[in-house]
Amino acid sequence: MPAPADRTALTPAAAAALIPDGATVACAGFVGVGHAEAVSRAVEARFLASGHPRDLTLVYAAGQGDRATRGVNHYGHAGLLKRVIGGHWISAPMLGDLVQADAIEAWNLPQGVISHLYRAIAGGKSGVVTRIGLHTFVDPRQDGGRLTPRTAQSAIEPRVQRVELGGQEQLFYPSLPIDVALIRATTADALGNLACEQEPFHHDLLAIAQAAHNSGGIVIAQVKRIVPAGTLPASAVRVPGILVDHLVIADDPQDHQMTFGADYDAHFAAAPAGRPPRQTGAPLPLDVRKIIQRRALLMLGAVPPRPGASRPVVNLGVGMPAGMGAVADEEGVGGFVLTVESGPVGGTPADGPAFGAALWPEAITTHAEMFDFYDGGGLDISFLGLAEFTPEGHVNVSRFGSKVSGVGGFINITQSTPRVVFMGALVADGLQIATGDGRLTILQEGRVPKLVPTVQHLSFHGPYVASLGRQISYITERAVFELRGGRLVLTEIAPGLDLQRDVLAVLGAPVVVADDLKTMDARIFTDAPMFQPAG
């Protein structure tokens, strides 16, 4: 039998030319990390020059982009795309524009479900059966995850079906074949084996490659370098070469940065022993964001580990929750394990374009494995964003007027964690505050209340999740609420505020005020560390 031929790298343009019209393309990546940017850029350039490929179906789990033109934004052209099945959309406003114009078929499905769907496709299974998504906009009794009117007429409808198994209602997400997988790693050897030594995590690489290979499709891997066969340790290989059809090296190094924010940051791969004992440098400003993060940090400190565990396990969502790690470092507090759905366990989760990575992680799992852990109830507490909420405790984080944010892993996490904490300002657009002396003063009120009679998009069904035995809290800069008996109850108010003028009068809908209404801890509003250094 002849020896296998060594692989040579294609140019990004040559790789883009391999994608036929009408193909279903699955791409890996997580916000500003791990997207095969050079290949996607070449696909866009080819389409703009020739009109091909066209009518693609794009599938991705986590959002991939810079909220401008990178990542899956390269596919944001009518004609290039026919449909999108995506988990998080806020990083790709060019796709959101196509949704608003009803120019494509589009679904927003839970991020964890899509990551599990790749494995189902790889294993030849009919799809994913799960309770995740019940009683939200993903439920077929609501929108079925559809984002555009034309989606209902799609040839691959429905993407979500309600079924009953063992006397319990579930949702069924059917599989679909993957024609092209676009993945990214750091190093390939001449046999196509892929290693990720300069990537912050390895998210869906193996599952997507297996799904495409076992669908009869092709796998295109963008890498930084190709080394001789036999030089990669077997334990370092994340995707075996038997799955990889083509290798690509970016023409421009900017198309293969570690994150969209940095060429390389060794801290994303550094061991916990290398981290400083506490954050150095100037403290973060005591603004609305930090006030909310401090109150959340106090809540986190009150959560005990489950029996037999040494530390509670935590998820931090994108945006304001992700910044809690930096505040915890600044305060010099720990005793808990922070995780991100992309795979990192421990360390300090990054924010912004590097969200999904973690500084000084203890371990890194795959995307789907992390959602196995989350969906099964492995977390002790989760902190998520808060954009709109109602007196029934419903929450919207996924769609607002012309803005398509997408739900990401929000539904997986909020429907599976024993204690869920939402974080966000009580009023948006123009809010100005003064603080630092242990009190809060509203200098200028915002114009848009976050508490509303009805949410525009049902990302979280308060009474349903509460019926599962979850504890649900809502933290804002001036008030804390809890969901009790299916109704929102105001339980805390910031020091220095008037209940009627500064809280109840600015709500867009009425809430119940607790008989034992408390004042929020003054340390939150003091421009000094909340905790005294040990010793």
Image (cartoon, rainbow, N blue to C red):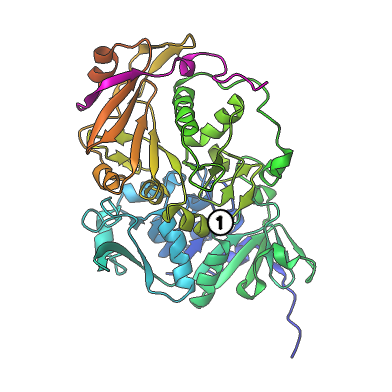
Mark 1 burial class by Cα count in 10 Å: few <14, some 14-19, many 20+ = many
Q: What segment is highlighted magenta in the picture?
A: 507-535
Q: Is residue 184 visible?
A: yes
Q: Can residue 311 be found in the magenta stretch?
A: no
Q: Between 279 and 189, which is closer to the camera in this rendering?
A: 279
For the C terminus, give its image quadrant.
top right
Q: Which residue lies furthest to the bottom in this view?
A: 1
Q: Is residue 53 above or below residue 293?
A: below
> Quick check: is 513 in the magenta stretch?
yes
Which residue sits furthest front?
Answer: 307
Give percent across and percent down for residue 14: 62, 66
Tag 1: residue type? His
Please provide percent x and percent y for residue 422: 38, 35
Residue 29 falls in which quadrant of the image?
bottom right
How many numbered marks, from 0 up?
Answer: 1
Locate residue 92, reporting x and y percent. 45, 47
Q: Position of 58 compared to 535: left or right?
A: left
Tag 1 residue: 203
Residue in the picture at 55% in, 28% down = 327
State the quadrant of the N terminus: bottom right
**Which of the two residues, 295 or 110, is positioned nearer the viewer here?**
295
Determine whether the residue tagged by mark 1 lies in a helix, strand or loop: loop
In which quarter of the view is residue 493 placed? top left
